[in-house]
Image (tube, rainbow, N blue to C red):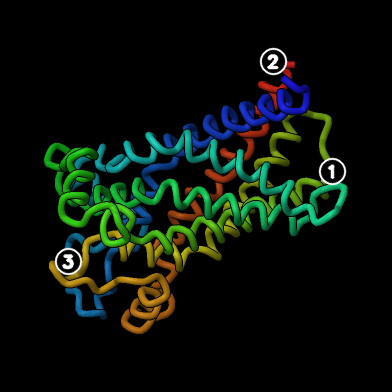
Amino acid sequence: MPSDVKEFLRQAAMQVGAGGSAGFVEVCIMHPLDLVKTRLQLQASPGAGVAKSTTYYNGVFDCIRKMAKAEGVFSLYKGILPPVLVETPKRAVKFLTFEQYKRFFMFGSDKPTPLTFSLAGLGAGVTEAILVNPFEMVKVTLQANKNKMGQVPSTWAVTKQIINESGFGLNGLNRGLTATIGRNGVFNMIYFGFYHSVKGIVPEYKDPVQEFLRKVGIGFVSGTLGSIVNIPFDVAKSRIQGPQPVPGQVKYRTTFGSMMIVAREEGFGALYKGLTPKVMRLGPGGAIMLVVYDYVYAFLDDYFK
């Protein structure tokens, strides 16, 4: 086997291993905040014709408290199986394709530029979204279920129900695909673009603790910025993939159409529902992923030399 092909395969294997490890660690730690974010995004404002009740959530901690009381403490991990099943290959694909897209977007430069990192992140996010959208559809369906944990149908049962009722297409298991592409594409464009650009500017520390904190800090800001910019796509995705307000009637169909409905009926601020838990998750979660990736990649690189 030619040496350049062997080196490419070695790097690809390390990118897959490091990316998969990063995704698995992040989802296990941060999933409850993703669930809270989805619940907040799914509920319409009381002024939009929805009566305020005991199941209306007034923020992150109110949602956690009411869920734990009505559905059980472990309800905070509803829908975790789909992301656990997909997170390792999902993050592996994201980091692998990011590295490959970087080569494509060099535009003749001898080293990556901020534009290179941003466009590579966009490409990686779009690729990731296409692969994971069916899992997202199942996850949101499970997260929207307000029954106690023992009464919630299994992941496989929900998947079969969606397929039997609506099929695999854009009205079924792939519902909300364009919203997922917009959400993941925009997030990763900012996430990777900011992280790698700033990491190259801020000087490295020789002290391992200071260097660790440098990476965590840059990763936290990267995840926070990406979350703030892409959340309208996330709200649209939750509304499209979640239960419709009136059973049997599809109110939220398209990405931008759903955004317009939410803004018109509930106010522009409703497009930022779930921002707090999203930032609480993807700020530190984004830092966790990038730092775990960097350290696992370095370990594998040293191990397989």
Residue 168 in view in this figure: yes
Kindly identify which numbered label has been placed on residue 303: 2
Q: Position of residue 268 (x, y in %)?
A: 43, 79
Q: Is residue 144 left or right of residue 86?
A: left
Image vertical order of residue 293 relative to residue 301, above or below: below
Q: Kindly report which numbered mark, 3 or 2, lies closer to the viewer in this rendering.
A: 2
Q: Residues within 10 Å of mark 2 (few under 14, many from 20)?
A: few
Q: Please tell me whether mark 3 or mark 1 is closer to you in this view.
A: 1
Nearest to N terminus: mark 3 or mark 1: 3
Q: According to the image, label 1 marks what residue?
A: 203
Q: Depth check: 243 or 227 in front?
A: 243
Horizontal relation, residue 153 to residue 11: left or right:
left
| Residue at x 31% of width, y 40% of height | 77
Question: What SS does tag 3 mark?
Answer: loop
Where 5 falls versus 230 (above or below)?
above
Q: Which residue is mark 3?
A: 53
Viewer can see residue 40: no
Q: Is residue 234 left or right of residue 95?
A: left
Circle 3 residues within 10 Å: few <14, some 14–19, many ≥20: few
